[in-house]
Amino acid sequence: MHELSVALEVCRIAEAQVGSDTVAQVVTVALDVGDDAGVEVSNLQFCLEALLGEPPFSNAQPVIHLCRGDVLRLAYLEVDDDRPDN
């Protein structure tokens, strides 16, 4: 079940990008997953939901965009920075 390893790495990347102090403010973690990426999408979704629902994250939602090819990448992170202009 390498989907768990992929999900753990996605969480590690998210934490590295936003910093450990603000990781709880991550609202959405989006991935692009290709149909030839060798990933079972439903298993990856399950693993991400489990990991993002626990500390240090605060119920961030995974979003998986299906695409063609062997793509597997973090597409974007949505962070709640408490600024009203966003």
Image: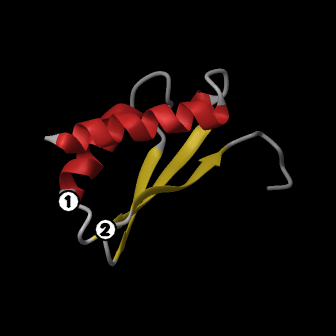
- Above or below, 45 against 68 in this view is above
Which kind of residue does numbered mark 2 sit on? Asp
**Is residue 59 placed above or below 19 in the rendered structure?**
below
**Is 58 above or below relative to 61?**
above
Whole-percent x and y of residue 55?
Answer: 45, 22
Residue situated furthest right in the rendering: 85
Classed neighbour count for the residue bearing mark 2: other residues with Cα under 10 Å, few (<14), some (14–19), many (≥20): some
Q: Quadrant of the C terminus?
A: bottom right
The reply to whether callout 1 and callout 2 are in contact (CB within 8 Å) is: yes
Residue wearing tag 1: 38
Can I make out residue 65 in this image?
A: yes
Q: Earlier in the sequence, mark 1 or mark 2?
A: 1
Residue on which disc 2 sits: 70
Residue 78 located left or right of residue 41: right
Tag 1: Cα neighbours inside 10 Å, few (<14), some, or many (≥20)? few
Furthest residue in direction bottom, as rendered: 68
- Measuring from the top left, give residue 64's x and y in whole percent: 38, 61
The residues tagged by marks 1 and 2 sit, at their Cα atoms, a distance apart of 8 Å
Residue 50: image x %, image y %? 30, 35
Where's the N terminus, which quadrant? Answer: top left
Horizontal and vertical percent for residue 17?
62, 37
